[in-house]
Structure formats: structure tokens, C-alpha cells
Amino acid sequence: MFKIDLPPDPKEMAAIESRRKRESERLARIMNKADNRGPDIEALQQQIAEKAKIKEEEKQRDEAAAQHLNWQDRMLQMDDKRRQQQRKEKEMADIEYRKQHQTPQSSSNYDLNDPHALKTQKPLSSEDIDTLGPSSMQNFAGQDVDSESRTELQKLQRREWLRNQTEEKEAERRRQAENEHEEQRVLADQIKYTTLVEEQEKLARQNATLQVVEANQEMFYKKEETKNEEKLVDQKKDYDHIMTQYNSAMMSDDPASAYTSDGRLIDPKGFKGFLPSQLEEIRTFQKSQAKEQEQRKQREQQSEAEYERQQNSMAKTLKIAEREAVRQRRELQRQVAMENARLAEQKKDVYGEKVAVSDSFFDQFGKSAR
């Protein structure tokens, strides 16, 4: 034999050591009773409660945001209506101003386009007629005797219009500035009111939450107290009912307690047995029934014996008749055989022996042809 000492493989030794370590750790975990692996029920319940609380808070926040959006929408609608009303009032004021101060008669070229110019024109005075010339005619087409005065009036009217337009523009600018200032003020009031409402809603939610928690706790304590009181009352009722039933005549074993003085049953459900007289009657009736049953049984046995005797007698008669029929059938067959033999002998004597036919009898046919 050869003795060979080879060094161990480091990889194999490391793998063996690792397996030994894992096995020792596994045994330590198995033997350690304090190692409670598995789902943490309390932590899971706490997580569920936290998720439900977060969901409820999100729901309340969404509802508050929806209410805030509804409030903003209402405020914007009110502001829009107010602006429309202001625009409408401004338009109505412009229309009224035009009716009062910008009539067609106050236009600079109204005298040129007046459809009633000839109807409203006054006749010339005597002084005007004297200045017309020697033609002795009142007036000529295209001649304007009031051009200077009309020109002066037109200048005054233009100055008045310019002043009115300037005042209107200044008033419009002031109105726009006032509207912008009012809009900024309303917007600031809305923001302030929104912030105040949000703070109030938050405080109201906190107070409502506290009130709900307190109400739930109070309701729980009252419910537990009521439940305990009802439980005590039910227990007292059950005990009284049991004692009443235990002490009542229903629990008594005396059969006479279920019958009246004249022997009638008080309640079929409360039957507790028969009276001695009733038992005696029942036993007497049972004895008479047993005697009648015994007599009926004897009569049935006699009837069965008579029937069996008749069946045996009938079977014997049928067997004898069958044997006689067999004998007669055999006798008839013998007579028929004898008659057949006799007839065969007679036939043989009449016709003689049977003639045999050879091949020469058939050869004589089929030898001629056309």
C-alpha cells in the first residue's frame, strides 16, 4: 500500500465551514423561543389605522377644497354680475347723455342735412328785404344772410363740444381708475376672506374631530354601561323564570296534578302519566286484546291447515289425471303405428316391388336433331 497525504482543498473546506455555520445558525433559531418570526399583527393594524386616518384626512381636505372652489366660483359669478351691471349702467348713462346733450340738432352740419329746413325757415324781415337790391325779389338761391352769426354760433358750439368731450374722457378715466381700485379691493377682500374661512374650517374640523372622539368615547361608555345593565336584568329574569318553572306544577311528577277533579286532562302538553284507575283499564283492555289475538291466530292456523289439505288433495287428483292422459296418449300412438304398418303392407301388395331405373333408360333420349 502507498500512503499519500494530500493537502485539503481550501474551497471545499470553506464550503464545508459555511454549511456548518448555516446549520448551527438554523439550529439556534429553532431552539430560540424568543424569536417570534412572522407577521407583526399589531404593526399591521397600526398601519391600517394610519392609512384609514390619512384617507379620511385627504377626504376632508378634498371636501374643504371643493367648498372653497365653490365659494370662489360664487364670488367670481357675483363679481361678473356686478361688472355686467356696471357696464349696463354705463351704457344706459351714455345713451341718456346722448339723448340730452348730443341730439341731432346740436350737430355741426345739421343745418345742411335738416329735412325740415324749409318748413322751419322764417320769412325775411323788411330790413332784410331792403338789403336785397333793386331787383325787388325777396331772396336768391345760394345767398346766405346769416352766415356770420351762424359761424359764430358754430364756433361756440365746437368749443362746448370739445369741453364736454374733455370732461367725458376725464370722467371715464376716473371711473376706470375707481373700477380698478374697486376690483383690487374686492380681490384683496376675497383673499382675506378665503384665508379666514380656511382657518375657520380648519379650526372647525379640529373641533369637530375632538367632539366626535369625545362623543364616541361617551357613547361607548354609555353603551357598555347599558349593556351591562341589560345583561344583569336578563340574568335576573332568567333566574326568576327558572325558579318559577322549577317550583311550578309543571315540574312535578305527580300525574294527578295534570287532571281535574272529574278526570279530564287540563293541558295535553302537561301530560305526566296515567292515573292508577286508567292504568288498570289499559291493562284489562290489553289482556282482552291479547286473548282475541290468540283466538284469531288459532283460526288462521286452522284455515291454513284446511287450505293445505285441499291443495294436497287437488295435487294428487291432478297427478292421477296426468298419468291417465299419458297412458292414453301412448295407447293412441301404438294404435297409429300399427295402422300405419298395416297400410304399408297393403300398398306393397298392390304396387309390387319398386322398379329400378338404369342409365340405359336415360341414354335413349336426345339422339335426333332437325
Image: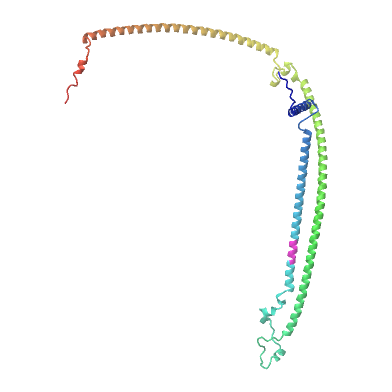
Residue shown at the point (74%, 59%) measured from the top left: 80
Prevailing SS of the magenta stretch: helix
Q: Is residue 87 magenta?
A: yes
User: Which quadrant holds the C terminus?
Assistant: top left
Residue shown at the point (75%, 63%) measured from the top left: 86
Task: Report the front residue among 84 and 265.
Answer: 84
Task: Report the front residue among 327 and 370.
Answer: 370
How many numbered discs? 0
- Span of residues in magenta: 83-90
Q: Is residue 164 magenta?
A: no
Residue shown at the point (78%, 66%) measured from the top left: 175
Which residue is outermost to the front? 2
User: As displayed, is residue 34 above or below residue 299?
Assistant: below
Residue shown at the point (60%, 8%) measured from the top left: 291
Residue 171 percent across, percent down from the top left: 78, 69
User: As displayed, is residue 43 above or below residue 104?
Assistant: above
Residue 242 percent across, percent down from the top left: 77, 23
